[in-house]
Amino acid sequence: MSHKKPLTVKKPWGKFTQYTHNEKTTVKIIEVKNGESLSLQSHEKRDELWVALDDGLIVEISGKKTRAKKGEQFFIPRKTKHRLSATKNARILEIAFGEFDEKDITRYEDKYGRTGTNKT
């Protein structure tokens, strides 16, 4: 699946940003507590687009860490190692493109002891 840049449409009252249009997607808001992190992971069956809803997030994609600014977007192709951590309580919008299944997670590192292909 190829990722298309979100469409921004200006209106007299402001604008809107359209992230998907007639595509199979799953949308979540992930909340990460101060000092916590998700596992370093990858997915076989989905790409992800992350949109930072708050400051205080660190996004890691293919070993590169970025301090995300509110509103910043990050595209994560399937099979790419990625992780999210927080320096304060913060949220990110996740749009998954493709077949979404929580079992489609391969964990490489996890501070909670979950590694390998995880079923939870």
Image: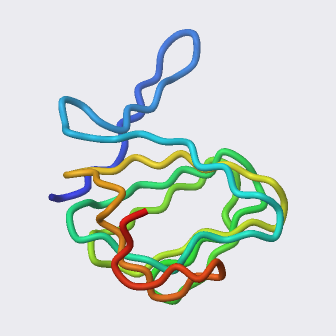
Q: Is residue 107 above or below residue 120?
A: below
Q: Position of residue 97 (x, y in %)?
A: 26, 50
Q: Position of residue 4 (x, y in %)?
A: 26, 50
Q: Quick one: 60 or 3, which is closer to the camera? A: 60
Q: Is residue 52 above or below residue 86?
A: above
Q: Residue most toward the top?
A: 12
Quarter location, residue 84: bottom right
Q: Is residue 47 left or right of residue 71?
A: left
Q: Residue most toward the left?
A: 1
Q: Is residue 24 left or right of residue 106?
A: left
Write the residue at 55% across / 76% down: 39
- Give the tally of numbered discs: 0
Q: Position of residue 99 (x, y in %)?
A: 20, 52
Quarter location, residue 110: bottom right
Q: Position of residue 77 (x, y in %)?
A: 30, 69
Which quadrant of the rendered structure holds the N terminus?
bottom left
Q: Is residue 57 left or right of residue 9?
A: right
Q: Quick one: 78 or 3, which is closer to the camera? A: 78
Write the residue at 76% across / 55% down: 55
Q: Is residue 21 above or below residue 65?
A: above
Which quadrant of the rendered structure holds the C terminus?
bottom left
Write the residue at 54% across / 50% down: 51
Write the residue at 34% across / 50% down: 96
Q: Quick one: 77 or 115, which is closer to the camera? A: 115
Colour scheme of this structure image?
A: rainbow
Quarter location, residue 81: bottom left
Q: Is residue 113 above or below residue 103?
A: below
